[in-house]
Image: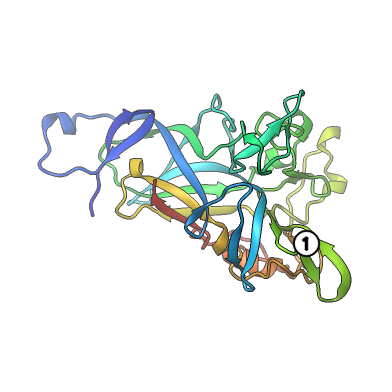
Amino acid sequence: MNKCVGLGVVSGLLALAGCGGSSSSSDTNQQSAETQLSLPFKAVVGSDPVTCGNTFTGLGTSGTEVSFADFRFFVHDLALVTDQGEVIPVSLDPSAAGQNADVALLDFRDRADVNDDGDLVDVCTAGTDDNPGFKDAVQGSVTLDPAVTIQSVQFTLGVPFDLNHANPTSAEEPLRSPGQAAGMTWNWQNGYKFLATDVLPSGGVTRPSDSSYLSQKWNVHLGSTGCEVSTSEPAEGTDPETCANENRLQVTLPVGALELENLAVQIDYAALVAGSNLGQDNGGAPGCMSGPTDPECDAVFERLALPWGGEPNTGGNPNAMVFSIVER
């Protein structure tokens, strides 16, 4: 299907319609223009949306039943890719909630309470109110030539390097902790969890090698590892050093036959943990927290198409298994 791009704003969304028929003088005189964009993201478990307080069954290699405690991830470098391979960057709207000019925090925890200090408490607990920090779309703007054909949507899962190693207590939202990024930092790495999907398996998490072991959570925390934080102290003005494993994932998803105003980016938790036993842990942190020797990370990183286990990290497959383009 050959799609050209017609520009127009409909209800604040980017209208990019397929075109056909003969061209007119007005078509040929159209100029590139900046257009507002809202790109939805959907978090699902198979065919069901991720929601707090509900249980999801049949997950992983043992068909585990789980409920969610967290489901958030950062994205940056959002772009559209043409059929000629041109990458057209999308400028994030710094005034939109849950994002700044560099990064957006998608937050699929739909339930939470807010205390007197404005902090979220009892997050993702049944019976709580709507989460004011819930975010399932990225807002921005893009400049497009009306004659181009958009073939793919592209973004990076993670936090840009310089922002990842800055002081989170003084960071701009949504990177501030305490703040919107509360629970999304890990001090031993001096960085952020790029992706945090924490579940509570029914019956907990056991360890075959230790009969006394029991964890309530099975976590997936994606982030940079092997960071030289001992010689990289931003608070003292020292620039951070490159991490051995950056673990940022560039995702490029073909739009197929869908027009851009009709599509959304989907992340499927069931696909993410398809090779994992969510009721069991064989060592390291419970679940996978990106440790290069953690036995649970092998299957998770395979699903994300990221290198793991000490191999050089040269970037992941742009079409990770857990992401797809779907109709919005």
- According to the picture, the residue beneath numbered tag 1 turns out to be 286
Query: Is the image coloured rainbow, by chain, by secondary structure, or in one colour?
Result: rainbow
Residue drawn at x 34%, y 40% as measured from the top left? 261
Residue 231, x across and y down, in percent: 86, 46
Label 1: state its secondary structure.
Answer: loop
What amino acid is labelled 1 in the image? Pro
Quadrant housing the C terminus: top left
Q: Foreground residue, 191 or 128?
A: 128
Q: Residue at x 69, y 38 (%)?
A: 163
Q: Is residue 115 visible?
A: yes
Label 1 Cα crowd, 10 Å radius (few <14 / some 14-19 / many 20+) = many
Name the side, left or right, on which 94 lies relative to 200. Answer: left
Q: Quadrant of residue 61?
A: bottom right
Tell which residue pokes out farthest to the right in this image.
212
Kindly give the residue lying farthest to the bottom in the view shown: 209
- Asked if residue 304 can be seen in this view, the reply is no
At horizontal 78% and vertical 72% (from top left) the residue drawn is 282
- Quadrant where the N terminus sits is bottom left
- Return the x and y of residue 169 as percentages of the image width and height: 78, 31
246, 12: nearer the viewer: 12
Name the spot of residue 224 as percent of width and height, x first. Answer: 71, 53
Residue appearing at x 76%, y 67% in the figure: 294
